[in-house]
Image: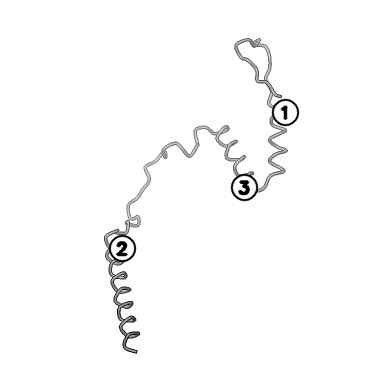
Amino acid sequence: MDTFLDISSCDTSVELSIQQEWGVIMNRFNEVDIADKVNIKAKLHEIVYPDKTFFCPPSEKVKTKGGQKKVSLNFLDERSEFLLTLNMLISLFHDMIVLIL
């Protein structure tokens, strides 16, 4: 089991190394599928470039002028009501024809 270094009792002249961990990361990266490779690379990118994470607001205001407008939901509701009414009329018409024949 790995143990982590307790910094409070550490001599300041001790050098830290990540060679063992880096070797494990490289081996894992070479063995996994492409989806896991993308995840590993994203995590390393967050560590190496903390200022460029996706959780930060954009440095420039996003230009939305001329962008696509949202579809009015009222139009969709009216269309759905129309289709439902049409479907009911067709069903009634079909039942009337069946009764006649």
**Mark 2 — residue?**
76
Q: Quadrant of residue 32?
A: top right
- Asked if the residue at tag 3 contacts the one at tag 1, i.e. Cβ–Cβ closer than 8 Å, the answer is no
Q: In the rendered structure, which amino acid carries the disc numbered 1?
A: Gln
The x and y percentages for residue 9 are 63, 10
Which numbered disc, 3 or 2, marks the residue closer to the eye?
A: 2
Q: Is residue 50 above or below residue 13?
A: below
In this rendering, would 58 be left or right of 20? left
**Mark 3 — residue?**
35
Q: Residue at x 55, y 35 (%)?
A: 46
Local SS, label 2: helix
Q: Residue at x 31, y 63 (%)?
A: 76
Q: CA distance from mark 1 to mark 3?
A: 24 Å
Instruction: Tell me the tag on residue 20.
Output: 1
Local SS, label 3: helix
The x and y percentages for residue 51 are 49, 33
Q: Earlier in the sequence, mark 1 or mark 3?
A: 1
